[in-house]
Amino acid sequence: MMKVYDGSTTGGSTEMPAEQKKVGIAEFEVTTSGAVLTTSGLGSCIGVALYDGTAEVAGLVHVMLPTAENTDGNRAKFADTGVEVLVEAMEDRGADRRRITAKVAGGSDMLDFSENGSSIGSRNLDSVRETLATFSIPIEGEDVGGDHGRSLKLEAATGDLVVKSASQDSTTL
């Protein structure tokens, strides 16, 4: 089942639908315009949605791997540096990390080839949680683990994160 997000309203409102911005794998986006930030294809990857309601700044990063071996490459690809670059970009747009809250989704074990130790999904999640803790950013909602993919919509105007899952109804964090 999927909810429809077509910008339609009831009660005769003439508001325009919010702009949508797609965040690809190993990418991030920050908005102050109330846009809807979307990402899909979250298996073992993690989507980290950050929100500062006072400054009206929201951001979304789609990370693939737990930790960066070095910082010469794409910082958004890794959980540790991806959260860091998103926080920095939000601060550049007026956010204050003391007001930022997080919502996290993904980290599935869809294709677990590990014979020993934790899967990529759970290691990604551990790294995201550790990095957010380093920044003292509380996690207000999670839809993580399992063995199914997810797609996300971060409604930047409200900070709501809508999670569409292959195995269940959409949920809002």
Image: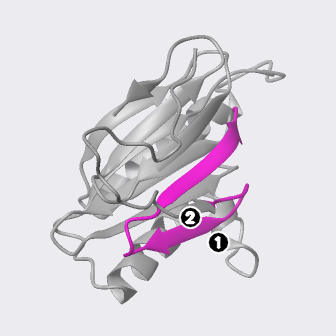
Identify which residue, 28 or 162, lies in the foreground. Answer: 162
Does 16 appear above or below 97?
above
| Above or below, 88 relative to 84 | below
Q: For the C terminus, give its image quadrant.
A: top left
Secondary structure under the numbered disc 2 in the rendered image: helix
On the picture, is 111 further left or further right than 69? right
Classed neighbour count for the residue bearing mark 2: other residues with Cα under 10 Å, few (<14), some (14–19), many (≥20):
many
Left or right side of 27 for 114: right
Q: Which residue is denoted by mark 2 in the rendering?
A: 82
Location of residue 152 (image quadrant): top right
Left or right side of 30 for 122? right
Q: Which mark is drawn over residue 85?
A: none
Observer-nearest residue: 112 or 116?
Answer: 112
Along the viewing direction, whichever of 146 and 16 lies nearer the viewer = 16
Q: Residue at x 33, y 82 (%)?
A: 91
Residue that extends furthest to the bottom in the rendered view of this protein:
92
Q: Earlier in the sequence, mark 2 or mark 1?
A: 1
- Residue name at image x 55 percent, y 22 percent: 145
Type of the residue with mark 2: Gly
Residue 153 position, x and y percent, is 51, 45
In the image, the segment drawn in magenta is 22-43
Residue 8 picture quarter: top left
Q: Are marks 2 and 1 in contact (CB under 8 Å)?
A: yes
Distance of label 2 from label 1 (alpha carbons)? 5 Å
Which disc number belongs to residue 75?
A: 1
